[in-house]
């Protein structure tokens, strides 16, 4: 293993690889590159980077298959994954989240935004909530299984509902603005407005039943997760 600040960029486009590699290296991160899915898997198993930036359209295999292989191997299962995708690949992005991806960025992307997202994810990994299971009040989150339980009973929910809850779990008590949540869950898709966040939270509260009161609305701003 090279070290816990190593990033693997896996993309078949050499211009993207060069851009991301040079930018992240300039910020002090170690960067290794792969241009095929097979190269990405080989590099991940050899170096075990802390994070993989993974393009969904790899030349030799779908990115979701690379992700599936990473998450099914105990040696690489804990590697963080940021998906790079075209706007038209929403279904693949959702599958990616179901397989354990941590975030996604839509092409064309801002390098500054990508760097900020990576820093935020690495900051969460370095914080207190790095174990598979987290609990706030009656709500439990299983990060590996991407499952939610209330008072020990599993609760079914959609990928986006899970992502919203996971965002709140990252910093309990902190208020997340609607714009932040749009950025985290929908990548600020221009076709999505803040009312979509409210709609998803209404559905999420229904699913949480008696624990719904733990998700608190801060009028005119956003949402936060409290222990009770």
Image: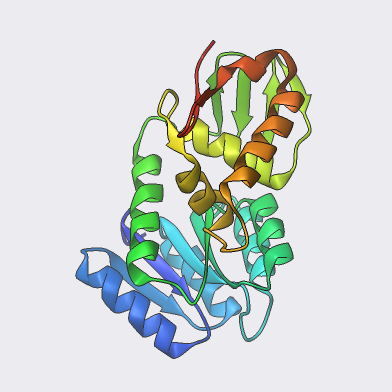
Q: In which quarter of the image is residue 143?
A: top right
Residue 57 in the image, given as x and y percentages of width and height: 63, 79
Q: Nearer the viewer, residue 219 or 102?
A: 219
Q: Quadrant of the N terminus?
A: bottom left
Q: Which residue is drawn at 47% across and 67% down?
A: 53
Q: Residue at x 53, y 19 (%)?
A: 136
Residue 81 in the image, given as x and y percentages of width and height: 51, 58
146 to the left or right of 47: right
Q: In which quarter of the image is residue 114?
A: bottom left
Q: Which of 12 and 178 is in front in this view?
A: 178
Residue 51 in the image, given as x and y percentages of width and height: 43, 58
174 to the left or right of 150: left
**In this rendering, does residue 200 appear at all?**
yes
8 to the left or right of 87: left
Residue 181 in the image, given as x and y percentages of width and height: 51, 45
Q: Which of 6 and 200 is in front in this view?
A: 200
Q: In this view, does 28 lie above or below 186?
A: below
Q: Residue at x 45, y 72 (%)?
A: 109
Q: Nearer the viewer, residue 131 or 19?
A: 19
**In this rendering, does residue 143 appear at all?**
no
């Amino acid at each position: 293993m090279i070290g816990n600040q190593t990033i693997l960029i896996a993309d078949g486009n050499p211009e993207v690889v060069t851009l991301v590699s040079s930018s992240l290296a300039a910020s002090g991160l170690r960067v290794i590159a792969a241009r095929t899915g097979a190269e990405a898997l080989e590099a991940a198993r050899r170096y075990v980077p802390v994070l993989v930036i993974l393009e969904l359209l790899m030349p030799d295999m779908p990115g979701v298959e690379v992700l599936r292989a990473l998450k099914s191997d105990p040696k690489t299962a804990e590697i963080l994954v940021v998906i790079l995708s075209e706007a038209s690949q929403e279904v693949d992005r959702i599958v990616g989240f179901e397989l354990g991806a941590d975030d996604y960025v839509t092409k064309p992307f801002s390098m500054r935004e990508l760097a900020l997202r990576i820093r935020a994810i690495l900051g969460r990994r370095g914080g207190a909530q790095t174990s598979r299971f987290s609990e706030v009040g009656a709500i439990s989150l299983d990060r590996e299984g991407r499952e939610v339980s209330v008072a020990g009973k599993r609760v079914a929910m959609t990928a986006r509902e899970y992502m919203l809850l996971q965002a709140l779990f990252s910093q309990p008590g902190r208020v997340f603005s609607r714009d932040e949540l749009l950025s985290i869950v929908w990548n600020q898709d221009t076709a999505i407005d803040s009312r979509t966040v409210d709609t998803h939270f209404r559905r999420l509260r229904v699913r949480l039943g008696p624990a719904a009161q733990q998700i608190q609305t801060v009028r005119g701003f956003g949402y936060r997760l409290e222990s009770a």
